[in-house]
C-alpha cells in the first residue's frame, strides 16, 4: 500500500469513527429518559382530608413528568408531585407518567370522617356517654363542641356529660370536616327511668330504689364496680309511688338485690305519719319478695339532716327503728343497713358530710357523705348479688 492509499485508509477510519460517535449520540437523544421512584414507595397512602403530601419521582436526563389523578374530587395532583386530599373522602390513584418512560402509580385513601353514633340519650346524674369517630386518629384531634352547654358538655375525647334535661347538638370538626350527633338528656321520672333502663336488657342487676339521696348519687354505678346497677331513683319519690310502680321499676328486672332508701319526703313534708310510713314500706318489701323470692332486699336507714327539727328527727329515728325490727323478723331476705348511724358524729348529724350548696344545702350529702354511703352499702350488696 503506497502513501496515497495509506492516507485514504486513515481518512476512512476517522470517518467511520466520527460517524459511530454521531450515531451513539443520536441514539442517546432519541431514547426516552427513564425514571425511578425515590422518596415514596409505590403502594397505598392514607391521608386525612384537606391535607397535602409530596410524592417524588426522579427522572434521568431532562424528561418531563406528568402528574394526574383518577378522581380529582377525592385527591388532586397540584404540581411536581404535590397532591391535595379533599373532604369528600374515598380512594383514588395518583399517576406519574415520565415522558417516553415508565408510569408510576400510588393508591391514595382519604379518610372519610364519620360519627359512629348519630344520637345519644343520657339521664341527668347517671354518668356520661361517649361519641366515637371514625377513623380513630380523629378522636383526640377533632375539635369537639356542644350547642347547649347547659344541657350537656363534651370534652376533647368525645365524652359527653349531661347536666340538665333538654337537647344539644354535639359536633366534631377535623381538618375542616364536621360531623354531629344529637344528644337528649332526660330527667329522672318513673317513665323516663323505665325507658332509660329497659327491663329486658338490664336483668339480674342491683336495683337502687330511692328519692333524692340516691338520685343525687352520681357515682352509684361506678361504686359497684363490675356489678351492674340500675338506679331507679328520682327526686321527691314516695313509697306510695313505688308501690304503684313496683313491677315496672323493680321486679320486672328480676334483680339479684334491691336497695331501698325511701320515706324521707313523706316524713319531712309530714304527708303521712310515722306508723303509716312503716306500713307502706313493709307493704312494698312484701310485694317485691312475693314476686321475686330469691331477691335480697336491703333497707337503708334514712339520714337525719342537720337542719331538721328535733321533733322530726325523733320521728325518723322511730321509723328507722321499726324497720330495723322488721328486717330482723325477715332476715332471710331483708337486711337493715344503718346509714343513719354512719352519718352521725356523737348524737348529732356530722355536718361535714352535708351542707353542699351545689346540691341543696344541708338537705343533701356532699362527696364525703357519699363516700360513707358507699362504705355502708356496696360491700354487702355486691356479696349478695354474686350469689346464684
Image (cartoon, rainbow, N blue to C red):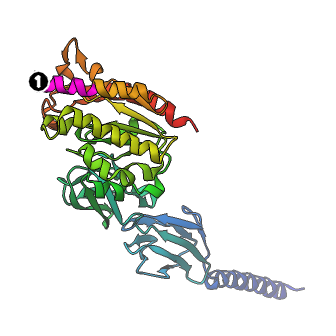
**Residue toward you, 106 or 291:** 291
Residue 54 position, x and y percent, is 45, 65
* Helix, strand or loop for the magenta stretch, by majority: helix
**Residue toward you, 249 or 227:** 249
In this rendering, the answer to whether 26 lies above or below 276 is: below
* Residue 277 in the figure: left or right of residue 34: left
**Residue toward you, 288 or 138:** 288
Q: Is residue 96 visible to the viewer in this orientation of the structure? A: yes
Residue 307 position, x and y percent, is 10, 26
In this rendering, the answer to whether 364 lies above or below 60 is: above
The quarter of the picture where the N terminus appears is: bottom right
The answer to which quarter of the image holds residue 50 is: bottom left
Which residue is label 1 attached to?
Answer: 311
Residue 348 position, x and y percent, is 18, 16
Q: Is residue 371 visible to the viewer in this orientation of the structure? A: no
Residue shown at 13% from the left, 29% from the top: 362
The answer to which quarter of the image holds residue 320 is: top left
State which region is magenta: 310-320
Residue shown at 43% from the left, 32% from the top: 334
* Residue 63 in the figure: left or right of residue 52: right
Amino acid at each position: 500500500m503506497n502513501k496515497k492509499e495509506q492516507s485514504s485508509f486513515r481518512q476512512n477510519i476517522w470517518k467511520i469513527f466520527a460517524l459511530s460517535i454521531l450515531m451513539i449520540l443520536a441514539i442517546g437523544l432519541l431514547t426516552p429518559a427513564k425514571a425511578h421512584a425515590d422518596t415514596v414507595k409505590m403502594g397505598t397512602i392514607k391521608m386525612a382530608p384537606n391535607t397535602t403530601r409530596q410524592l417524588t419521582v426522579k427522572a434521568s436526563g431532562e424528561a418531563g413528568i406528568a402528574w394526574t389523578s383518577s378522581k380529582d374530587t377525592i385527591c388532586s395532583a397540584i404540581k411536581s408531585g404535590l397532591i391535595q386530599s379533599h373532604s369528600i373522602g374515598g380512594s383514588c390513584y395518583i399517576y406519574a407518567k415520565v415522558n417516553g418512560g415508565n408510569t408510576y402509580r400510588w393508591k391514595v385513601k382519604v379518610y372519610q370522617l364519620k360519627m359512629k353514633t348519630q344520637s345519644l340519650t343520657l339521664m341527668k346524674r347517671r354518668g356520661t356517654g361517649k361519641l366515637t369517630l371514625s377513623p380513630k386518629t380523629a378522636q383526640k384531634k377533632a375539635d369537639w363542641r356542644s350547642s347547649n352547654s347547659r344541657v350537656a358538655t363534651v370534652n376533647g375525647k368525645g365524652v359527653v356529660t349531661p347536666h340538665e334535661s333538654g337537647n344539644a347538638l354535639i359536633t366534631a370538626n377535623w381538618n375542616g370536616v364536621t360531623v354531629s350527633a344529637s344528644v337528649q338528656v332526660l330527667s329522672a321520672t318513673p317513665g323516663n327511668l323505665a325507658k332509660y333502663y329497659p327491663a329486658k336488657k338490664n336483668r339480674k342487676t342491683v336495683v337502687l330504689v330511692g328519692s333524692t339521696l340516691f338520685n343525687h348519687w352520681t357515682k352509684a354505678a361506678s361504686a359497684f364496680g363490675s356489678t351492674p346497677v340500675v338506679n331507679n331513683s328520682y327526686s321527691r319519690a314516695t313509697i306510695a309511688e313505688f308501690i304503684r310502680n313496683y313491677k315496672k321499676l323493680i321486679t320486672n328486672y328480676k334483680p339479684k338485690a334491691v336497695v331501698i332508701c325511701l320515706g324521707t319526703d313523706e316524713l319531712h313534708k309530714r304527708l303521712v305519719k310515722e306508723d303509716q310510713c312503716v306500713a307502706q314500706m313493709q307493704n312494698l318489701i312484701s310485694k317485691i319478695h312475693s314476686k321475686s323470692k330469691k331477691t335480697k332486699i336491703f333497707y337503708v336507714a334514712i339520714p337525719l339532716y342537720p337542719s331538721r327539727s328535733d321533733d322530726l328527727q325523733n320521728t325518723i329515728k322511730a321509723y328507722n327503728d321499726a324497720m330495723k325490727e322488721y328486717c330482723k323478723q325477715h332476715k332471710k331476705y331483708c337486711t337493715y343497713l344503718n346509714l343513719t348511724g354512719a352519718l352521725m358524729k356523737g348524737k348529732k348529724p356530722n355536718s361535714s358530710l352535708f351542707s353542699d350548696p351545689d346540691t341543696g344545702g344541708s338537705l343533701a350529702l356532699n362527696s364525703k357523705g357519699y363516700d360513707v354511703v358507699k362504705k355502708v352499702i356496696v360491700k354487702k350488696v355486691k356479696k349478695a348479688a354474686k350469689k346464684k
